[in-house]
Amino acid sequence: MELILVIFITTLLLALVYPSLSVLDNSASSEAKRLASIIRYLNDSSINRKIVYEMEINLVGKEVSYDSPDGKKTLILKSLQKIYLSSKGEVTEGAIKMPFGYEGLIEIFQASFIQEGKSITLTYNPYSRQVKMDTAQ
């Protein structure tokens, strides 16, 4: 009976701790998913609240800063390699500011992540307002 109780408690603790361990994952795919989540959040927030938000991507420091209702937030993306914007073309160094206006982000956006031979491209389409990820080896 005690063994069943120990197994139950261990399983319960593992179920509570495991989701927080995935936040520590710094793989290219998890970084791309985080950036996709930020883009969706800023896009939806700017459209629904009619507030202009701004996201800045610094390719030198490999960080993304963005405005949110809770204040300015920053995220480090170690495997981010390059950005493509329809208005600026391909950018591999420097910083880019992208406004999310009342209609959201209004240009095509791509971010390329590379880690350990695995390439991931994150694409935002302003016409469908969808963010998708493509993986290549």
Image (cartoon, grey):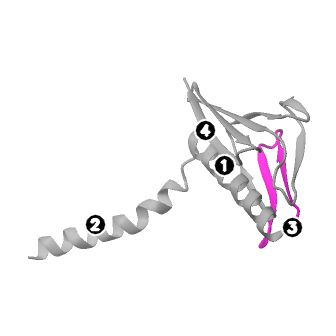
Q: Quadrant of residue 53?
A: bottom right
**Which one is earlier in the sequence, the residue at label 1 or at label 4?**
1
Left or right, 19 with reference to 5: right
Q: CA distance from mark 2 to mark 1?
A: 32 Å
Q: Nearer the viewer, mark 3 or mark 1?
A: 3
Q: Amino acid at mark 3?
A: Ile
Residue 46 falls within the magenta-colored stretch: no
Residue 11: mark in rendering: 2
* Comes first in the chain, label 4 or label 2: 2
**How many neighbours does mark 2 have within 10 angstroms: few (below 14), some (14-19), or many (20 or more)?**
few
Q: Are marks 3 and 4 in contact (CB under 8 Å)?
A: no
Dots 4, 2 in contact, CB < 8 A? no
Callout 1 secondary element: helix
Residue at the spot 90% in from the left edge and 37% down from the top edge: 94
Three-letter amino acid code at disc 4?
Met
Q: Position of residue 128 (x, y in %)?
A: 70, 45
Which residue has dot 1 on it? 36
Residue position marked by numbered label 3 in the rendering = 51
